[in-house]
Image: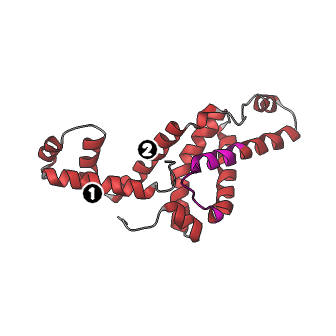
């Protein structure tokens, strides 16, 4: 576990760190696919959209200067909607077919409700937790999960896992600190 690493967004901005890019893609691809499906794109169209958005991010993130008063989600949302519109325009110029007509009906206006802050946070945290689980020993992970998600008391978890109550609190602290590091700069205040 790397507890002193700079935030992912900073690593993407300042270096050509391939691990950071891999982690970003692992973290954000499911969210981007989810948004694409909520717009109404097919599986293939969603895959194209995710690829297009990732390419823009690879180009723009090194220049990205995080400002806590602005929304990373909003910036990502704008890129996603613009790339979706580009995709629709390209398809509209191509041969007309049944799918082209369906694409014209999609709502990609700026006021789309599917990119809400709460949904974004839940998706991103859920994915980060999935990716982070392998970084911890099974008992550390389970102690944190049972305490935070399941709401069990530290005393009960300690008895179930054969550890001290203090170890349960330490496990929770380590996992949550790592989660904050993983998502630093990616969640809006």
Residue at 85% in and 38% down: 92
Q: Position of residue 124 (x, y in %)?
A: 48, 46
In the rendered view of the protein, which quadrant contains the N terminus? bottom left
In this rendering, the answer to whether 100 lies above or below 54 is: above
Residue in the foreground of this view, choosing between 167 and 18: 167
Residue at 55% in and 68% down: 18
Where disc 1 sits, the SS reads loop
Q: Is residue 34 left or right of residue 123?
A: right
Residue in the foreground of this view, choosing between 104 and 121: 121
Q: Which disc number belongs to residue 33? A: none
Image quadrant where residue 145 sits:
top left
Q: Is residue 71 magenta?
A: yes
Q: Position of residue 51 (x, y in %)?
A: 66, 52
Q: From this viewpoint, which residue is outermost toward the bottom?
A: 15
Q: Is residue 125 left or right of residue 167?
A: right
Residue in the foreground of this view, choosing between 89 and 166: 166
Residue at 11% in and 45% down: 159
Q: Position of residue 70 (x, y in %)?
A: 59, 50
Where disc 2 sits, the SS reads helix
Where is mark 2, residue-wise? 126
Q: Are the two marked residues, 2 and 1, in contact with CB atoms closer than 8 angstroms?
A: no
Q: Which residues are magenta?
A: 63-81
Where is mark 1, residue-wise? 137
């Amino acid at each position: 576990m790397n507890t002193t690493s700079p935030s992912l967004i900073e690593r993407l901005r300042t270096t050509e760190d391939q691990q950071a890019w891999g982690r970003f893609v692992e973290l954000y691809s499911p969210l981007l696919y989810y948004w694409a499906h909520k717009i109404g794109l097919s599986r293939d169209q969603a895959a194209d959209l995710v690829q297009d958005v990732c390419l823009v991010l690879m180009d723009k993130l090194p220049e990205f200067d995080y400002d806590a008063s602005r929304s990373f989600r909003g910036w990502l949302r704008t890129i996603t909607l613009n790339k979706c519109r580009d995709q629709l325009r390209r398809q509209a110029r191509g041969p007309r077919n049944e799918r082209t007509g369906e694409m014209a009906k999609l709502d990609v206006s700026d006021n789309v409700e599917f990119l809400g802050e709460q949904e974004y946070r839940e998706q991103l945290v859920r994915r980060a937790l999935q990716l982070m689980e392998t970084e911890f020993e099974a008992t550390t992970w389970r102690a944190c999960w049972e305490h935070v998600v399941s709401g069990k008391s530290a005393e009960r978890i300690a008895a179930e896992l054969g550890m001290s109550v203090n170890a349960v609190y330490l496990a929770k602290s380590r996992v949550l600190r790592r989660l904050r590091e993983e998502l630093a700069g990616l969640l809006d205040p």
